[in-house]
Image: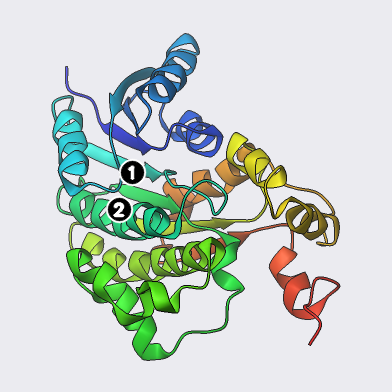
Amino acid sequence: MNKDVVILTGAGQIGMAIARRVGFGKKIVVGDKSMKNAEAVAKIMNDAGFDAVPIEMDLSSRESILNLIGEAQKYGEISMLINAAGVSPSQAPIEAILKVDLYGTAVLLEEVGKVIKEGGVGVTISSQSGWRMPALTAEQDELLATTPADELLQLEMLQPKNIKDTLHAYQMAKRCNEKRVMAESVKWGERGARLNDIAPGIIVTPLAIDEFNGPRGDFYKNMFAKCPAGRPGTADEVANVAELLMGPAGAFITGSTILIDGGATASYFYGPLKPEK
């Protein structure tokens, strides 16, 4: 019997927390570059009564993304996308961050948007980081939103001479994710489907722990210590927002980004995290 299918990309804590909220009664296809990670998350979910299957996929490859979609369609119509895949500034060089987080996400949203079921819904995970770099021009934002995916990495603003470091690359990627969600949501809407974005702050996951122990560890610890919440968040708190966005209570929300960062961005602009001039 065919089921509605959930595609989960990124076998991590945030993606799994969201899938546990919305994946009951559906086939969950767990894609990750590490088959070991995909198998581990699928096992945890299957042991909890879900119906999950792992698949190896590389978000930086259109071919791999199309293969993932093709495998998912063997089980039924794709009704949900949870994109939680990506790499952080401490995990990868500039080129990899742009290829995975920026280009790969654009391709995934585009390709799933071509086959998403009527009434379907998607959510992608960006980051608070995209909110803190200087504002881009309207023209630059439009280029990030609408440039054909295979031409994105040729944009002048994304050339190595214009990217200062891995953090800047990550910020550009996440800004692009948010603009891309806006543009793609219009296309998804033509199929009667919705697409939104969540921009988390410091969420305790293995990826975040890499950051805490990396070269910017003190920066991140200071950030959550001086945000209004005074602490990092949890994957389940991100899942709370995703459950709203992906469920009937969020039926009028599409093309949006929800910032969930304990107030860190607010503190960055108007509080103790504001950079000294």
Tag 2 residue: 104
- Callout 1 crowding tier (Cα within 10 Å): few <14, some 14–19, many ≥20: many
As drawn, 6 above or below 102: above
Tag 1 residue: 81
Q: Is residue 239 left or right of residue 265?
A: left
User: Residue 40: x and y, percent?
Assistant: 45, 18
The kind of residue on which mark 1 rests is Leu
User: Residue 74: x and y, percent?
Assistant: 13, 26
The local secondary structure at tag 2 comes to helix
The local secondary structure at tag 1 comes to strand
- Callout 2 crowding tier (Cα within 10 Å): few <14, some 14–19, many ≥20: many
Tell me if residue 251 can be seen.
no
Q: Indicate which label's residue lies in the foreground, 1 or 2.
A: 2
- What residue lies at 36% left-to-right and 51% top-to-bottom? 100
As drawn, 173 above or below 32: below
* Residues at marks 1 and 2 touching, judged by CB atoms closer than 8 Å: no
Q: How many marks?
A: 2
Q: Which mark is residue 109?
A: none
The N terminus - image quarter? top left
The front one of 12 and 2 is 12
- What residue lies at 46% left-to-right and 73% top-to-bottom? 163
The C terminus - image quarter? bottom right
Between discs 1 and 2, the one toward the N terminus: 1
User: Residue 117: x and y, percent?
Assistant: 20, 45
Q: Is residue 271 left or right of residue 254?
A: right
Tell me if residue 217 can be seen.
yes
Marks 1 and 2, how far apart at CA: 14 Å
As drawn, 141 above or below 197: below
Q: Is residue 111 left or right of residue 173?
A: left
Tell me where residue 276 sits by quadrant: bottom right
- What residue lies at 43% left-to-right and 79% top-to-bottom? 162
